[in-house]
Amino acid sequence: MSSADRQGMRAAGGMIATLLVATLIRSAAAAADPAGAWMLTKDNAEQYKELLPEPIYHRLKAGEYYFKVVPVDAKKFRANYTDRFWKASENNAGKYAIDVVTGGLKEAGGEARPTALYGLPFPTIDAGDPLSGAKILHNYRLRQMQGDGAIHYFSLADVTADSQVLRSVQIFLSYKFYLGTTSVPPKTLPDNTESRQLAAATEPKDVAGVGVLTWRFNDWTTWDQVWAYLPSIRRVRRVRTSTRGERIPGFEVYGDDADCYDGKVEYFEWKLVGSGEVIGPLGTDSPYARPLKREKGQRWVMEVPYNRAVYEVPGATGAPWLTLGNVFVRRPVWIVEVKPRDPYYDLGKVILYIDRELYHAYYKIGYSKGGDQFQTNFCGTGWGRTPDGQFAAPTAFLMTGINERENRGTPTGRYTRETFVRDFADEWFSPEHLTKLSE
């Protein structure tokens, strides 16, 4: 046999092996797919155009995006929250109202801001109510608070249209809620804070130790207090609250993009501009809560597979920042227009697509102050639930930011381990601990 023949046989053998592997992968994927799952691609995009925000549809039609869509069992999806949460939400009807000037939450018939509540404050939304936009966002915020607190590591990667990773950072994030918690709330809110958050970069070395601490107050007009620790000067410094509304340097996401929107409700004017259905992303490969496992103290853990993006999978097609491990669902949504009160906020307007029942978000579409659409966010939620059904909570497993002007994307979240912490010490979220942690 000639050398050329041997090379040809090796090439053919390699091709056959590749085809066999591909076939096995497709077969395994098909076996794992739930009944009724289907692919949304450029070939059927036109049929579902009305169920997608315009920038999503545009890239789908161009072949840059493709989504696995799975059916949702309404009863199982609702069970992503506990029976206690839903009962508390029903009992909240008529108890709360909105401050007309600030959009803040208050007790009905008075001006006091609640210091203890649980469940959705507005279980029923009247689309004709001029304050419905703010009510929807308070529901959005309170459904998150049932998780008490959490801690996890995640990464940021800035990816170009040709799959170049310009930079990446590993982040440690922890947070605690004092309002809306499943656990018994404190008798008094510490320093009148409704929540606290502490984050720090862990990799690479040139940014390791940079940390940020945020206190959010249970007050309509008090702005968040934000501290930053910079290793270069070894000091904690107060920084402007509006820095949370600025793009994170070197990436295509903003400081308050976590969980789609992580700002204070009173920072913005909220207007319900529509309702309908959307095909939107979730954060994992299932629309249903994963079982939580007990760790020491009041810590509950869940683990999920890593959600790889196109740029991380040899031979994968599509926009490099497109994630491949999470599913999409067709769901009823509220469409809310958001305009910042802060003149220093980067965006001029935002459109949020929020689930009409569970109140998590699917998309955040950002516009400049001049009115051009340039920022698109995929927001993917996942859920955990204890075996006894007494505790359940959402977590933001996916947030992908796309800069439509520069054609770059930042897939973030995608952590594989979420720990819900129900017994965080208040001292963890202090300027002193920020210094110690960052060092």
Image (spheres, rainbow, N blue to C red):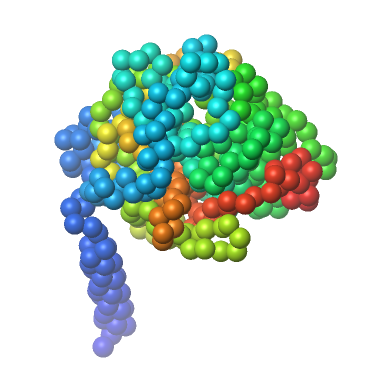
Q: Position of residue 87 (x, y in %)?
A: 37, 40
Above or below, 300 relative to 200: below
Q: Residue at x 56, y 64 (%)?
A: 295
Q: Residue furthest bottom?
A: 1
273 or 163, which lies in front?
273
Along the horizontal axis of the image, is 79 left or right of 37? right
Query: Left or right: 418 with respect to 371?
Result: right
| Residue drawn at (18%, 53%) of the image | 36
Residue 235 visible in the displayed image: yes
Which residue is farthest top? 101
Residue 41: horizontal and vertical position, in percent? Answer: 23, 44
Q: Is residue 360 left or right of residue 207?
A: left
- Give the quadrant of residue 132: top left
Q: Quadrant of the N terminus?
A: bottom left
| Residue that appears at 49% across and 43% down | 146
Number of callouts: 0
Question: Measured along the vertical axis of the image, is residue 206 above or below residue 89?
Answer: below
Residue at 69%, 26% (x, y): give it: 240
Nearer-the-camera pick, 114 or 157: 114
Q: x%, y% of residue 133? A: 40, 21
Q: Nearer the viewer, residue 303 or 371?
A: 303
Q: Is residue 365 visible?
A: no
On screen, residue 92 versus residue 413, left or right, reads left
- Indicate the position of residue 104 as horizontal and vertical percent values: 52, 20
